[in-house]
Image (cartoon, coloured by chain):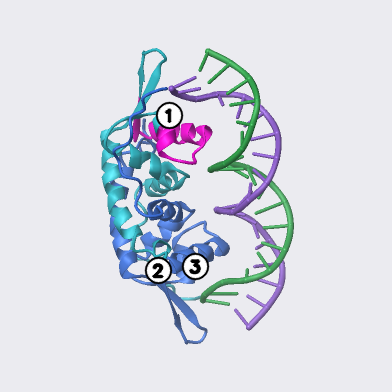
Chain colours: A cyan, B blue, C purple, D green
Amino acid sequence: MVKRRKSNVPPPPSDCPLSKCMRLLGAAWAAHVIWYLRQDERCFTELQHDIAGVSAKVLTNRLRKLEREGVVERLTRPTSPPTVCYSLTPVGQELSAALTNVVHIAQRLKCAQVAG
Amino acid sequence: MVKRRKSNVPPPPSDCPLSKCMRLLGAAWAAHVIWYLRQDERCFTELQHDIAGVSAKVLTNRLRKLEREGVVERLTRPTSPPTVCYSLTPVGQELSAALTNVVHIAQRLKCAQVAG
DNA sequence: CTGTATCCTTGGCGATACTG
DNA sequence: CAGTATCGCCAAGGATACAG
């Protein structure tokens, strides 16, 4: 029997929301969505235009998931034709701020150093 | 022709390291790996033991990717039998700190509110 | 405009077995 | 101990067409 050092790091809090959160944000285009909602609300087509290359299906999917998690808010305007605007919730804003920190660090990762 | 509001949010910096970074961290068990390396270095088996449920294949894969990005460092000790220790690089430490912020926010997401 | 439905392909991940 | 090799599945995502 090998004497194994026990980790003195406490287990991830509760049922590991971190993991779920990271997978949510790690999904394709998720970070982009939050990024482009940072300042003002954007409607569906605007987002699709902002985020070049995303398909409607995936964009819808991302927005739905983020909405269910309370990150973004969906607001329907009864105009003609009807438009839908998405914005960040307060929690979403905080998340966005936290991501800003990650951006700075991410730029120092190897993958960001294109000119090796 | 619809007058479309141009986004006043600048595009994601450079070639979007944020996205790559988030996908890196969003991969299965990636957050766990960083979490358990927060305080002290851990060797392969210790990590596999810490992170209940991860397979050797995936753990190796995660460590390799994180190593290539400069997040974790691999240190081989020429003991008998040889052991390999993993630790966070300075950048990895910063990333870990940034993730701590995300944890706090993640706990306020809907997915974390088990008792709805 | 804002999506949904469907098909199809890719690859992420788990499980298992094997190696230096 | 610290991995690699191989297989197989399934979900994520792209493309396209359709709908309210």
Q: Nearer the viewer, residue B38 or B116?
A: B38
Going by the image, does A55 lie left or right of B6? right
Front residue of this view, candidates B19 and B41: B19
Type of residue at label 2?
Answer: Val
Residue A83 is drawn in which quadrant?
top left
Give the structural element (helix, strand or loop) at label 3.
helix
Q: Which residues are magenta?
A: A47-74
Give me the disc on residue B64. 3
Q: Quadrant of residue C20?
A: bottom right
Category of crowding for the residue at label 2, using alpha-carbon neighbours closer than 10 angstroms: few (below 14), some (14–19), many (at least 20): many
The alpha-carbon separation of the residues under discs 3 and 2 comes to: 9 Å
User: From the viewer's perspective, is residue B88 above or below residue A18?
Assistant: below
Q: Chain of mark 2?
A: B
For disc 2, the marked residue is B72
Quadrant of the image for the C terminus of chain A? Answer: bottom left
Residue type at numbered disc 3: Arg
Could you tell me which secondary element the residue under label 2 belongs to? strand
Could you tell me which residue is drawn at 34 percent across and 39 percent down? A36
